[in-house]
Amino acid sequence: MEFRLEKGLCCPVCHDIFKDPVLLSCCHSFCKDCLQSWWREKEDKECPVCKKRHSREELNPNFALKNLCESFLLERGQRSSEDLCSLHSEELKLFCLDHQEPVCLVCINSEKHSDHRFRPVDEAAPEHRKNLQETLEPLKEKLKVCEGAKVKFDQTAEHIQVQARHTERQIKEQFKKLHQFLEEEEEARLSALREEEEQKSQRMKEQMEALSREIAALSDSVRATEDQLRAGDVSFLKNYKAAVERVQQLQRSVFPAPKLQFFMPVRKMRSLPGFPQRRSATLIDVAKHLGNLSFNIWNKMKDMVSYSPMILDPNSAQPKLILSEGLTCVRRAECRLQVPDNPERFDDFWAVLGSEGFNSGSHCWDVEVGDSKVWSLGVFAGSDQMKGFMQSKLWTIEYNKGKYKGVSPSDSDYIPTVKNQLQRIRVSLDFDKGQLSFSDRATNTHVHTFTHTFTETMFPFFNTTDTVKILPVKVSVTVEKH
């Protein structure tokens, strides 16, 4: 390699490394002095290689080639000095096995290397190169592992971004539904308020119009009667009978109650049936619209939401399983999903864990398996490593090929008591008593119970090649009265 490089850096005239190379128009390069000496012996300025005539007077320096030649000479000089003994300037031909360094022939007779072992450089180099290569292999393996881990880390980092965007979108969708419900509820309540306002305003308007007509009639009668009172005696007496009848008739139409008494106090007149009365319930029923408003809306919201006592953990789901948007249903995927191979993710089992583990208390959840042909339900001890064989951490009942089986770290027995195919199953864990029970929700009959002293955090376990679903529980609001 070095020979070919050196040959490519040699002048075609002097066959030595270029010195002040110049470039002709034909793209051939020569040492400047070599070219000028060549031309002095020739009549025409032609290229010594291709014989093409050079028409220009000036010679263009080839700086790139010059820099390359200088770098090559400098490197070769350093390499030559490295091959010589720094003490004796002799060629390094031997290798001291005791000091693990190359030495010259003079060094072997020095006091520094007395009684040392030596090997020729051409023998020691292959052996030590092999030793170094063997020492390097573990590092190369570790590098390979680290590079593979980096790929997984990069995939995980990318998946974190995907999870964040997906979760953000779902949060926004949930709040959009809640906002829509609140907006619709607000509009319904405002509409009810406006309707009551319109009804009571219309009723008050009708009463005011009737009262205005009554006031006008009374005003006309009072005015006519007062005019007669101001008339002369004869005129007054001639019209007296008609005036009294007119006033009494008007009184009977206005006050259809017992005979009106003259000089009756106003406060007693107000109690008469014909006297204008302000009706009850004429004002807006503010209490109906504002009383416990936020509580009533919140109570009504329970009809649009559901609560699941158990949520699945997507980070534990085997890559061939898909979880629903609400994380309460798991089903088989058409193909393997592109998800990180994180430690808490199952790889062999078609399984997923609940998001919450239990280390005390009583807990239960209902699961719908429907017509699934293969499934397994129960609990799993711990949630850190999900790789390899897991029976030592499982307490489950399984359904496969029409048969039910209870599986625990210590045993695996068929369950003969199941008469009808289970479709909805209640799983009950009493951690403190050390009991894990299964029952048929359709008939409320017991299926199987494990008894064990649990010491680790127990996570709900779901395994299927079809579909299983965690059933929601009924949501209710209770008001405690003191």
Image (cartoon, rainbow, N blue to C red):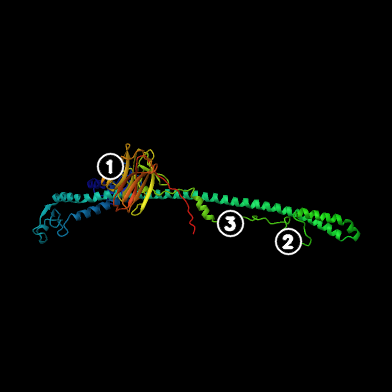
Q: Which residue corresponds to mark 1?
A: 413
Please state which of residues 199 and 442 is positioned toward the viewer in this rendering: 442
Quarter of the figure with residue 54: top left
Residue 362: percent from left, percent from top: 36, 52
Residue 155 place in picture, x, y as percent = 35, 48
Residue linked to disc 3: 287
Is residue 343 visible in the rendered image? The answer is no
Q: Which label lies toward us, 2 or 3? A: 2
The quadrant in which residue 12 appears is top left
Residue farthest to the right, as pictured: 234
Label 3 near label 2: C-beta < 8 Å? no
Q: Residue furthest front?
A: 258
Where does label 2 land, which residue? 268
Q: Earlier in the sequence, mark 2 or mark 3?
A: 2
Marks 2/3: CA–CA distance? 33 Å
The amino acid type, in three-letter code, at marker 2 is Lys
